[in-house]
Image: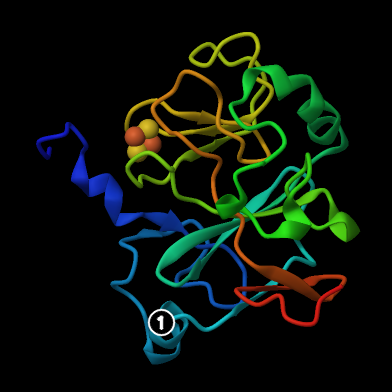
Amino acid sequence: MSNDGVDTSRRRFLITATSAVGAVGAAGVVIPFGLSMNPSARAKAAGAPVEVDISKLETGAMLTVAWRGKPVWVLKRTEQNMKDLPSLDSTVADPHSDVTSQQPEYAHNEHRSRDSRANILVMVGICTHLGCSPTYRPDVAPADLGDEWKGGFFCPCHGSKYDLAGRVFKNVPAPLNMVVPPYKYLSETLVLVGDDKGAA
Ligand code: FES
């Protein structure tokens, strides 16, 4: 543990890579971030955009890819998830994503995603408190998160909570919504993370 009480091992951003272009490991295998990178993966870590094939992404499922050495999540939200977002406005700190540093202009909306595929959330999976990677918790009203929980992300380091648009709840250590990176669609099922030039 470091002085500030953070388990520094959590900062290594252990992620489970699932099927996606630029994935860094086989499905279900948790590996230390960065250790297994081949040369092309290292180029991606340096900043190259990453293509993500979402053709097999099921509703409610999330996959993780590496971009600039960080985990980026791509989540296909359910209809109910989308309906629930407005009901959380009074409990999140920045309901309308007015802090402009946290998302591109096209994600400055309730769902924090491009309108063309509003249910697809693309987000840098890093807590805005001290940089741990939160856990995806889609379960509704679990015992440890309470009756009001409608699915979201829980940071195990100091307990920050985010909804399924990455909006941070009030009264937690994290100060800001999680970051939506620049991204665009190359086709219906191919997302490019890290580049939004020329996109409508
Ligand atoms: S790093 Fe402290 S709550 Fe996430």
**For the residue labelled by badge 1, is the local secondary structure a helix, a strand or a loop?**
loop
Q: Is mark 1 within 8 Å of ligand 1?
A: no
Q: How many labels were placed on the picture?
A: 1
- Image spot of residue 75 (x, y percent): 69, 50
Q: Where is the C terminus found, in terms of image quarters? A: bottom right
Q: Quadrant location of ligand 1?
A: top left
Left or right: residue 111 compared with residue 63 = right
- Image spot of residue 199 (x, y percent): 81, 76
Q: Residue furthest bottom?
A: 39
Left or right: residue 142 compared with residue 88 = left
Name the residue tied to disc 1. 46
* Rendered view: 80 above or below 118: above
- Image spot of residue 79 (x, y percent): 87, 36
Identify which residue is drawn at 77% across, 30% down: 85
- Image spot of residue 72 (x, y percent): 54, 60
Residue 187 is at least partly visible in this image: yes
Amino acid carrying mark 1 in the image: Ala
Identify which residue is drawn at 43% across, 87% down: 43
Identify which residue is drawn at 65% across, 12% down: 148
Please tell me in which quadrant of the rendered image residue 54 appears. Answer: bottom right
Q: Where is the N terminus found, in terms of image quarters? A: top left
Residue 57 is at least partly visible in this image: no
* Rendered view: 23 above or below 82: below
Please tell me in which quadrant of the rendered image residue 178 appears. Answer: top right
Please tell me in which quadrant of the rendered image residue 64 appears. Answer: bottom right
Disc 1 crowd, CA 10 A, few/some/many (<14, 14-19, 20+): few
